[in-house]
Image (cartoon, helix red, strand yellow):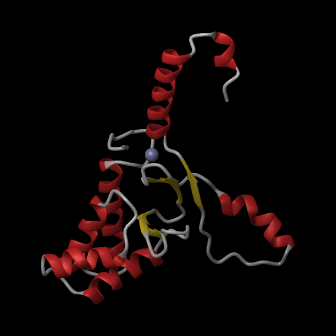
Amino acid sequence: MCYSDDPATSRGAGHAHDWRVAVEHALHAAGLRTSSARAAVLDWITVAERPFTAEMIVQQLVNGWGTGSRPTVYRTVDWLRGGGWLARLHREGNDRAYVRSLPGGYQLICTDCGESQIITDLALALLVAPRLQDLGFELQHEHLELYGRCRQCRRAEATIRKEAASAVAPDSLSATQGV
Ligand SMILES: [Zn+2]
């Protein structure tokens, strides 16, 4: 449903390419070389449009195309997750599923089409810091998934509603009583 690239959000091809470039920099900064097997994993993740599991990568890359190995896939996924480049989704039915992320980013996941977006300008840690300090709690890790419906899915529904409304009830009273 949500295949169009919206420049106002982090979804789409442009963002995925930025993700790939940023990960590459992080790998080099960590002194890790980009082996062809590791690059294949990164390429796979870069074009993934929906939440995915490490096993899905193994199935396609290792079992399907004979590229790399299961340990390479899992090590790469672990490294990306540790650096905040992947977020693991915790919602029921999405267990062990990952989406691309950015360090310090939070996930918006559309419950209709499954696409995820990343928000990076939510300074949640700053917001909760005073309260955590009151409680004597030291923050080590944060994770936030926000579930809802993306702009494209909402637009699609609004269009359907509008069509249904004009077909059934042109009366303005019944229209204003709607939710
Ligand atoms: Zn959607």
Residue most toward the bottom? Answer: 71
Q: Is residue 77 left or right of residue 146?
A: left
Q: Residue at x 37, y 43 (%)?
A: 2
Does 158 appear above or below 46? above
99 vs 131, nearest the viewer: 99
Q: Report the label total.
A: 0
For the residue pair 94 and 75, the one nearer the viewer reads as 94
Is residue 59 something that shows in the picture? yes
* Image side of residue 20 versus residue 99, left or right: left
Q: Residue furthest right?
A: 134
- Judged from this view, the residue extending furthest toward the top is 171
Can you say which quadrant of the picture contains the C terminus?
Answer: top right
Q: Nearer the viewer, residue 47 or 35?
A: 47
Residue 65 % position (x, y): 13, 76
Relative height, residue 17 to residue 28 (above, below):
above
Give above or below for 171 relative to 139. Answer: above
The residue positioned 26% from the left and 87% from the top of the image is 70
The residue sitting at 29% across, 81% down in the picture is: 73
> Where residue 114 appears, x then y in whole percent?
43, 54
* Place of residue 130 in the rendered image (x, y in percent of width and height, measured from the top left): 81, 64
Q: For residue 7, what is the image quadrant?
A: top left
> For this rendering, which residue is in front, 175 or 48?
175
Looking at the picture, how far across and down is residue 151, in whole percent?
A: 48, 38
Q: Residue furthest left?
A: 65
Side of 37 relative to 87 (left or right): left
